[in-house]
Amino acid sequence: MVIDSHQHFWIYDEARDSWITQDMKVIRKDFLADDLRPILKANDVDGCVAVQASQSESETDFLLQQAEANGFVKGLVGWVDLRAEDLYDQLEKYSQFEKLKGFRHVVQGEPEGFLLQPNFIKGVGQLVAFGFTYDILIHQRQVQEAFNFAVKLPNVHFVLDHIAKPLIKNGEIQPWADDIRKLAELPNVHCKVSGMVTEGDWQNWEKADFRPYLDVVFEAFGTERLMFGSDWPVCLVAAEYEGVKGILTDYLSMFSDSEIKQVMGTNAARFYNLDL
């Protein structure tokens, strides 16, 4: 099966979704499961994982509704206040929902040192008791901090979103590359090959622009810890779904069938414990 490990749904709200700026007007509207279903079918994708886009428990409830009503949504990554005093009780409540697989915080928008707060580390550590995963959403400048964070939590299953958003548009690869290699030394950290087109030149990107960054993550994580993600509908500011998928499938043409299957579906299914 081909699994898209990273996409979003939302009912657009101008105040809440202020991160969707005017130059991203193509996505300033609602995107729901009915919109994604035909796109997945046209691109031979069998299922997906929906990921939170705003930070509220109502967002998690909304994603649960989308997932429960649509069989192709195989899992979801929600939001919960990981620093809350009653976190354990909240996680116990959420553990009853089979499609809820993990949680994420938008750390890319937080000040330096956010990941290393003792109460945040303690909260993420509690995910293990319920089999929940954690998605690491950061910018390239935060990869070293993410390493210092993840090394303290060896029993948590982590996945790095969007290859940590390197400066692809500027063609910069260091210090991102060295930091990624260090992070990948931790065996409990996986990586989503996603979000690249929005870090490139939206109007003029070419597949070759992404090859140096793909070389780094494939060398660092290997095909056993990488997974395909479209980042739909955010990707639409720079590329259609087919174009995003094509960047990775073209790169994978040099790999074996078994390795391709790992990256395009098996790894996501195993990491998120998806019921296929």
Image (cartoon, rainbow, N blue to C red):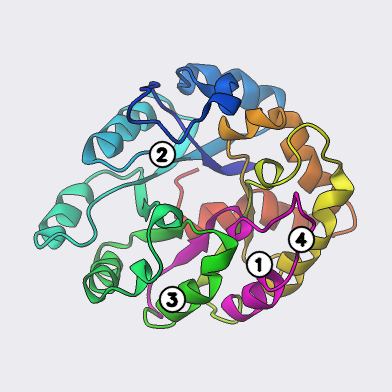
Identify the residue at horizontal 63%, vertical 76% (top origin).
Answer: 179
Counting from the top left corner in percent of width and height, residue 235 is at: 63, 34
Q: Is residue 114 above or below residue 194?
A: below
Which numbered disc flags the more N-terminal residue, 3 or 4? 3
Which numbered disc flags the more N-terminal residue, 2 or 4? 2
Which numbered disc flags the more N-terminal residue, 2 or 3? 2
- Within 10 Å of the Cα at label 1, are there few (<14), some (14-19), or many (20+) other Cα atoms? some
Q: Which residue is mark 4?
A: 213
Counting from the top left corner in percent of width and height, residue 5 is at: 55, 46
Question: Which numbered disc covers residue 224?
Answer: 1
Question: Which numbered disc covers residue 99?
Answer: none
- Within 10 Å of the Cα at label 4, are there few (<14), some (14-19), or many (20+) other Cα atoms? many
Viewer-nearest residue: 269 or 124: 124
Q: Nearer the viewer, mark 2 or mark 1?
A: 2
Question: Which numbered disc covers residue 150?
Answer: 3
Which numbered disc flags the more N-terminal residue, 3 or 1? 3
